[in-house]
Image: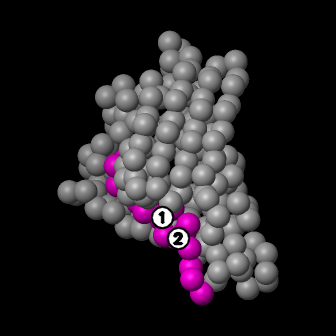
Amino acid sequence: MTDRKASVERNTLETQIRVSVNLDGTGDSRLETGVPFLDHMLDQVARHGLIDLDIQAQGDLHIDAHHTVEDIGISLGQAIAGAVGDKKGIRRYGHAYVPLDEALSRVVVDFSGRPGLVHEVDYPRASIGQFDTELFFEFFQGFVNHAAVTLHIDNIRGRNAHHIAETIFKAFGRALRMALEPDPRMQGVMPSTKGSL
C-alpha cells in the first residue's frame, strides 16, 4: 500500500481549519481546536485508531462552537477520504464495542462510498462542561458526508454523559482502525463482491 497520508485546509467565513492525517501512524495527535472537550475526544480517536492526527482550527467561538465542530468533522472526513484513496486492499468494514464504567457504546463503519449516519445516543445532560452534546451529531454528520462512509453509532447504556461520549469516540477510533487495516488477502482488490463499492 502507498503512503496513506493527507492534508486538508478549509476556510469559510466562520472557520479556518487545517487537518493532517496518517492512517498508518502510532496514535500521535496535535490538537488545537479551541474546543477543549472536542480535543479530548479527538485524542481518543487518534490513540485508539492508531491514526496520527494534526488538527488546527480557528472559529467563531465567541458565538458558539457549532461551526467549528461541524467544520472539523467535514475536514476530518475529507482528509481520511484522501488518505484512504481508492480503498483497494482495506478490510472496508470495522466495528467496536467500548465500555467505560457504566457506559457501553458500539460503532460500526463501512467505507462504502455512500454517506449515511445512524446516531442513536441519548445524553443525560445537554452539555459536558461547556460542550453542547447535540454538536456530536453535527460532527459525525459532517464526517460521513465527506468521508463517504456509512456510520452507525449506538449507546447501549450509560448514565454519565462524559463516559458515554468517551466510549463513542474510542469505539469510533477502533472501528476506523479495523476498517482501514490492510487485508493481505485483498491486496490490490476493491473490497466488494461486485468489484466496486
Say which residue label 2 marks: 181
Q: Residues within 10 Å of mark 1 (few under 14, many from 20)?
A: many
Amino acid of disc 2: Glu
Rendered position, 172 above or below 195: above
| Helix, strand or loop under label 2 | loop
Task: Tell me the crowding category of disc 2: few under 14, some 14 to 19, or many 20 or more residues within 10 angstroms, Cα based.
Answer: some
Q: Nearer the viewer, residue 163 or 57?
A: 57
Q: Position of residue 1 (x, y in %)?
A: 63, 69
Range of the magenta residues? 165-185
Location of the C terminus by quadrant is bottom right
Residue farthest to the left, as pictured: 101
Q: Is residue 55 magenta?
A: no
Residue pictured at 57% horizontal, 42% vertical: 20
* Dominant secondary structure of the residues highlighted in magenta in the image: helix
Q: Residue at x 73, y 85 (%)?
A: 193
Which residue position is annotated with label 1? 177
Q: Which mark is residue 68?
A: none
| Contact flag, marks 1 and 2 (Cβ < 8 Å) | yes
Based on the displayed image, in which of its 4 quarters is residue 15 positioned?
top right
Q: Where 186 falls versus 144 (above or below)?
A: below
Instruction: Indicate the position of residue 194 as horizontal and vertical percent values.
Output: 79, 83
The kind of residue on which mark 1 rests is Arg
Q: Residue at x 28, y 48 (%)?
A: 163
Residue 160 in sight here: yes
Q: Is residue 176 magenta?
A: yes
Question: Viewer-proximal residue, 17 or 197?
Answer: 17
